[in-house]
Image (spheres, grey):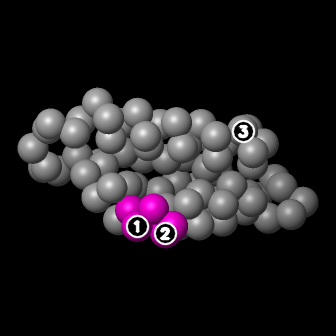
Amino acid sequence: LHGFTKEKALSKLAFFLDRHKQLHKHTSPGNDTVEIITGSGKHSPHGPVLRQAVEKVLIQRQITFQLNRGKGSFTVDAFSY
């Protein structure tokens, strides 16, 4: 998602999450994680815009995730949603 506008990034995130869930709905839960790269916001005059927006979506969808501080990414449990 790094490099996209907030609106485009959130659209791509929603598509990815919905598509992943659809494709793997018959897969047994296991140790399946995905990394969502937002960037750290260091070059943005408004700070980490994508990080905050993505975190909000993950919380709203009740998805288990870990913020990878200093790496500009989230590790997401692909079977938690």
Q: Earlier in the sequence, mark 3 or mark 1?
A: 3
Residue 55 or 44: which is nearer the viewer?
Answer: 55
| Disc 2 from disc 1: Cα separation | 5 Å
The image shows residue 31 at horizontal and vertical percentages of: 17, 50
| Residue occupied by mark 3 | 8
Magenta: main secondary structure: loop
Image quarter (top left, top right, bottom left or bottom right) of the N terminus: top right
Instruction: Tell me the tag on residue 62.
Output: 1
Three-letter amino acid code at the position of disc 2: Ile
Residue 53 or 39: which is nearer the viewer?
Answer: 53
Q: Is residue 21 positioned above or below 38 on the image? A: above
The image shows residue 15 at horizontal and vertical percentages of: 52, 36
Q: Residues within 10 Å of mark 2 (few under 14, many from 20)?
A: few
Residue 3 shows in this picture:
no
Asked which secondary structure carries label 1, the reply is loop
| Residue occupied by mark 2 | 59
Residue beneath the point at 83% across and 55% down: 44
Residue 42 or 27: which is nearer the viewer?
Answer: 27
Asked which secondary structure carries label 2, the reply is helix
Instruction: State the extent of the magenta-drawn residues as a range.
Output: 59-63
Q: Residues within 10 Å of mark 1 (few under 14, many from 20)?
A: few
Rendered image quadrant of residue 53: bottom right
Image quarter (top left, top right, bottom left or bottom right) of the C terminus: bottom left
Residue beneath the point at 79% across and 64% down: 47
Three-letter amino acid code at the position of disc 3: Lys
Do the residues bearing badges 2 and 1 touch, measured as CB atoms within 8 Å?
yes
7 lies left or right of 36: right
Residue 42 shows in this picture:
yes
Q: Residues within 10 Å of mark 3 (few under 14, many from 20)?
A: few
Q: Which residue is most to the left? A: 28
Query: Is residue 47 on the magenta stretch?
Result: no
